[in-house]
Image (spheres, helix red, strand yellow):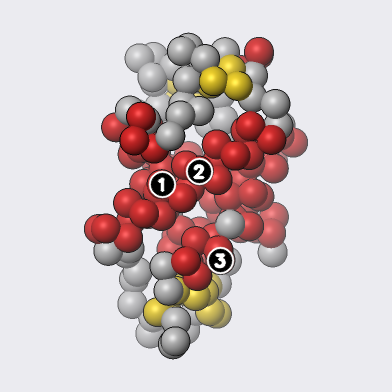
Amino acid sequence: MLESLAEAAHMVFCESLKARSFHYGPTTDEKLKTHNAFLPYAELSEDLKEQNRQNVRDIPIKLASAGYIMIPARSNDPPFNFPGELLEVLAEAEHERWMQSKLDNGWEYAPATDKTKKLLKCLVPWDKLPEEEKEKDRMMVRGIPQILARAGYAIIKANV
């Protein structure tokens, strides 16, 4: 199930890249609209697959922090979208999770990203993150219902 969810997360990520006119390139370049992870899941490096696994492992934690749970989907479950303020809170949590994962794996902050040297310009607190980078985290949170739906799950408010 973890691998299925990780693959679904990667598919949602690739769909968002495609919607913004990106294509595969050996390096990620916003101006050229290339991304080095715009590949089928099976062709990703083990490191990139693990990033997707870490992302989906955190979904139940994010949902619980917002008062939601995932359940097996029923045919009558309405489409789910996170309310505006909640989207922002969960996007910030996603950035913090991503940042901690990178730091734990030896990445460091630098004013310019250099993946070969494990340097990233986005290893900064949420309030210092450029808006276009915040939007990437929002996109990942918006994708949670799609990721879960592809694995047969839905999101509902938890009964507390």
Label 2 or label 3, whichever lies nearer to me, is 2
Instruction: Decide: is 58 above or below 52.
Output: below
Instruction: Decide: is 117 above or below 55.
Output: above
Q: Residues within 10 Å of mark 1 (few under 14, many from 20)?
A: some
Residue 11 in view (yes/no): no
- Which amino acid lies under the numbered mark 2 shown in the image of this protein? Glu
Measured Cα–Cα span from mark 3 to mark 1 = 16 Å
- Which amino acid lies under the numbered mark 1 shown in the image of this protein? Glu
- Which amino acid lies under the numbered mark 3 shown in the image of this protein? Pro
Name the residue at 39% across, 14% down: 32
Marks 2 & 1, CB-CB < 8 Å contact: yes
Instruction: Decide: is 125 above or below 120.
Output: below
Measured Cα–Cα span from mark 2 to mark 1 = 6 Å
Instruction: Decide: is 24 above or below 83.
Output: above
User: Residue tagged by mark 2?
Assistant: 96
Screen quadrant of the N terminus = bottom right
Measured Cα–Cα span from mark 2 to mark 3 = 16 Å
User: Residue tagged by mark 3?
Assistant: 60
Q: Which of 54/40 is in front?
A: 54
1 lies left or right of 65? right
Residue 133, image quadrant: top left
Disc 3 element? helix
Q: Identify the residue at the far left of this view.
A: 84
Name the residue at 49% across, 61% down: 62
Marks 2 & 3, CB-CB < 8 Å contact: no
Residue 120 in view (yes/no): yes
156 lies left or right of 127? right
Marks 3 & 1, CB-CB < 8 Å contact: no
Disc 2 element? helix
